[in-house]
Structures are given as C-alpha cells and as structure tokens.
Image (tube, rainbow, N blue to C red):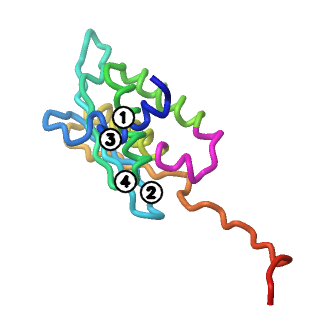
Amino acid sequence: MSMDTVLIEHMMNPKNYGTLPLSNAEGIGKNPENGEKVAIYIHVKEDEEKPYIDNIAFQAIGCSTTIVAGSMLTEEAKGLTLDGARNLVDATMKLLDKLPPEDAACSEMVALAIKAAVDTYEKRREESDYPPFTYRVSNTCTPKDEEINDENTVD
C-alpha cells in the first residue's frame, strides 16, 4: 500500500475517532493562534508494574491534516507502555523539526495531546481528580508571507 493510499485511508476513515467512556486519563493539545485543539483519551492498564495504553481515542477541532495525524499517531500509540508513548512523542517531534512550521503544527498538536494524556495519567496516580494537562504548540499554521516582487508590477 502506497503512502498516499495510507493517508487517504486515515482521512476518509479515521481510526480511534471519538470519545472513550472508560478512559482513565485525558490530555489536550491546542493551537491558541487559531483555536484548533485535539483531545486524547486513554485507558491505561497496569501490567506487572508496566502500565500500557490498552485503548486510545481522539477528538479534534481542526483541519484534515489534524485528523490524519490523530488517526495515525493513536494507532501507533495503542499497546505502547507509557515510556513507549513518550518515545513516540519524542520521535514525532524530531521528525517535525525538519518540516516548515505550518506543516508541523497539526501533528505537533496531536503528539502534545498524547504527552498530556500520559502526564495526566501519571499525576492521577497520586491525585485521582487531577485535571487534564493542556499543552500548546510551538509551531504556527500560518505560512510566512511571501515576498512581493515589485519589479514586475505594471502601473
């Protein structure tokens, strides 16, 4: 299956979209610049002191790129230990460093929401009613203004 086919499949039929009634932690990634946000819901199971993400879901107020990133990253995160989920977030952020900021913002928002959910889960182990973490993107969706070439302007 080509990468284009995979992306189209995630866009047309996003995986893990919706809420997760049995979640035991949530996290939010948001872009304060344009109001877009992603909520991640995770159900973590304890397995011999190694908690892992048994189930995950997401909801997004954002563009189709955000939905595709949410679908792909939640599929990757399912079944990972909490350390594995952190590694997924770190690896995603490193990949995004190579992209223009406007291309990276949507995926960064999803990755930060996963990190927020994991951090919320860990905090709730000490304080059960701790509110969900919210992390803000550092990238921006707005492309830099293209410079106008005045030499070709006709008066």
Task: Tell me residue 112's x, y (percent).
Answer: 44, 42
Tell me the residue that label 3 is attached to: 12
Q: Which residues are magenta?
A: 96-107
| Mark 2 or mark 4: whose residue is earlier in sequence | 2
Task: Tell me residue 66's x, y (percent).
Answer: 41, 47
| Mark 1 or mark 4: whose residue is earlier in sequence | 1
Disc 4, SS: strand
Look at label 2 and name its amino acid: Asn
**Is residue 153 depicted above or below 88 in this figure?**
below
| 127 or 144, nearer to the observer | 144
Question: Badge 4 local density, few (<14 within 10 Å), some, or many (20+)?
Answer: many
**Is residue 2 depicted above or below 41 in this figure?**
above
Mark 2 and mark 4 residues within 8 Å of each other at the beta carbon:
yes
Indicate the quadrant where residue 62 lies: bottom left
| 106 or 120, nearer to the observer | 106
Please give the name of the residue rendered at 65% of the width and 39% of the height, measured from the top-left corner. Answer: 98
Tell me the residue that label 2 is attached to: 31
**Residue 22: image tag:** none
Does the magenta run of residues contain 103? yes
Question: Badge 3 local density, few (<14 within 10 Å), some, or many (20+)?
Answer: few
Disc 1, SS: helix
Q: Residue furthest left?
A: 21
Task: Tell me residue 122's x, y (percent).
Answer: 32, 31
Please give the name of the residue rendered at 80% of the width and 85% of the height, measured from the top-left corner. Answer: 154
| Mark 1 or mark 2: whose residue is earlier in sequence | 1
Tell me the residue that label 1 is attached to: 9
Disc 3, SS: helix
Tell me the residue that label 4 is attached to: 37
